[in-house]
Amino acid sequence: MRGDTYCSWGHLISWAFDDVRRYCILIILVNARDSNICLYDFIIITQKNKRYGDMERRDNNYYDVRAQDVKLEDITSSAHNAEILRVLRDDETTWAACLVISEEIDDDDEEEEEQKGFVIREGDDCGWLGYFIGRNKHVQHLYIQHMPEEQISVLMKGVKDNRSIQCFDFSDGVRGDVIIDSLVPFIIHNANLKELCLWSVDLGLDCAHSLAEAFNKREEKYLTRFSFRHNNLSHEALEEIIAALSGYKQLVLEPISEEMIGRDQKYYDMLAQIIDLNCITSSNKNAEIFRKLRGDAWEKKDDLRITQYDYDYDEYFCAGEDDDWGWLGYFVGRNKQIRGLHLYCLPEEEDEVDAFMEGLCRNHSIERIGATHCEIDFSSLSPFIINSRNLRSLELWNVDISLENASSLAMALNRRQRKSLATIYLWCNNLRNEALEEISAALTGYPYLETFNVSENVLLGANGCESLGAIIRSSALRLEQVSLCGNDFDDNGLQTLTAALTNAATLQRLSLSSNRLITASGLRALSQLFSSACPVETLLLEDMNIGNEGAEALADGLMGNTTLKHLVLTPDSAGITGTGWAAFSRLLCDTSSINNTYSSNHTLEHIGDDYCFISNRFHSGGEYSGEYLRGIPSDIVNCLETNKEYQSLQDAAKIKIGRCHTDIPVEGFFEYKLKFLPLLVSWFLGFGTRKCSNCQNATTREFQRRELSAVYKFIRGMPMLAVDGQMGLKSSTGRKRKFNDREYAEV
């Protein structure tokens, strides 16, 4: 009040109440008879401020005296809220054990709003609400949402005395000191408290210290869940709280923040063992993968595959909206058992990608890492490539590698101390010559490459082929598989690559499929490879227009080769007609003479497509169907099956000679007389135990006739020698004859 005039007995003080639920108006009237007449200002105090000021000054004695007589309708805004207070006051056992308290929100359906719990409106007394909650023995779950600060402090003054609440959930954007002072005694003394949730509470270091002290003083070290998100916690404050919770063995902690920015290694280390995995994953399957990674229980033989689609495999992590990529990267980075990781997707948000990569780069157990259809910034993956001690395989499929990305990758490969990479896949990565040159220059220092695949990229000119040749030459001692499919280099490029491959002393598989610029001239250059020390067993030329000239070039190059088993091409589109197939027929069995038949190729087992089917059959030892040689002339099929059936080149040659040459000349061996006859017989007898699976009986009978014919011609050519030998045996019957060593050897 303004002024200092003393109000005498004559003063009239009148309290006028106009709608007691809204305003209290104090009117001071001065007696007109006073000599000093002053009219004082009206002081209007809103009921809101006055009422809550009074509530703050109330104590438990105030409530205890009035609890049974207070009219609940006068301290609530609705019959629904009054009924809630009555149930709380009377401690009815029919209580649902769950109470939600929230501020009034804009909702046209009042009935639906009230079903949510106690909705605070104008006229509700939060002091009485808190008192009745504090005295109640049946309420177990309390949820407080969206309340003004002055109401919260009044409510919590009574709530802190409750001892039955098991789950306390507070969500509101207030300062921490508004609730923490009342929450501390509640935490310490409520032995039934199991779950505590504080969301959107600004917890400074002082509040964190008070919380930590409450957890330390609590005798019952039993909490099953603690959740505090969006609380503006510093790492120092967080560390103090987590240290106080270390004695709570059954505790699981919900995520503190969904934001990736601001997390560091210390943040993850503090929470790793108590974080609730179900709250940072989108499915039970993903939570189980987190659990295996965290506990180092990962099967070494299984690669972790991160995909967008759910597959019915335990090692497939199906990334969903609720999966935390920061935690995924952390657990992968800390795991010591995982050997393989393949990425089929990455998150769209840049901070999520950075958080995942930061964790991944700490891993040192991964041996195989791959990516398919992912946009990868290799500057973020570079630390992993540089520092991963066990990395042996880098596989990139459909990853657009720009010149900038290629530079980052090349830099990482150059800085890597252990040049132990054995497998490089750069498949369909839109590699340009400039980018390939940078990567190739870095890979020339890797002498242990076993598998090198640069396929389905852009047109490679002379420089690109030179770069690939440099890698091949530097790794010639270990290379087993080289794939250069779909790069569309020409004959000159193939000649460059072939020259580099001639020194690959361990190469088993070479794929040149879908390089449609290669002609017969380029294929003829492969003869240099076939005649070198390169032991290639499989050559893939699928989806190429080989033509008759190309077929003849391949057939000529394979004359005398004893290593190539599989020549994979596409008969329907290879452009090979009868002329070209005739060249392969001569290669496999040249019938112009016995010597030429013997010198034919007895190594090739497969010409044609369906190589995947064939390779599985070869490894499993199963039987073949005719499908794998579809489109191949029957005479070539017979020769290929003979080569496969008889692993010995000599046996395959004898079969072909016996099959193709009905009249075997033996006259040239007459000079050796009977000394050659046992050799001739034993040569034919070998076919009685080795039979072609497709013509067993027919082949046996055929060779028996050939054997009889050859012996007959031999005896007919030396009749007297044969007769004399028979007569000599008859004259010696019944008496022993001694032979010296020389005579025995002649016989």
Image (spheres, rainbow, N blue to C red):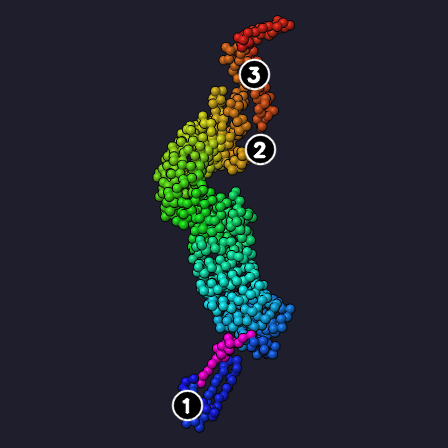
The label shown at residue 623 is: 2
Q: Earlier in the sequence, mark 2 or mark 1?
A: 1
Q: CA distance from mark 1 to mark 3?
A: 149 Å
The label shown at residue 38 is: 1
Q: Say whether residue 472 is visible.
A: no
> At numbered mark 1, what does the secondary structure look like: helix, strand or loop?
loop
Q: Amino acid at mark 2?
A: Glu
Q: Is residue 56 magenta?
A: yes
Counting from the top left corner in percent of width and height, residue 507 is at: 44, 33
Q: Amino acid at mark 1?
A: Cys
Counting from the top left corner in percent of width and height, residue 276 is at: 53, 56
Q: Is residue 510 magenta?
A: no
> At numbered mark 3, what does the secondary structure look like: helix, strand or loop?
helix
* Image: magenta residue range: 42-60
| 150 to the left or right of 191 | left
Residue under label 3, please give it: 681
Q: Say whether residue 137 is visible.
A: yes
Q: Nearer the viewer, residue 724 or 172?
A: 172
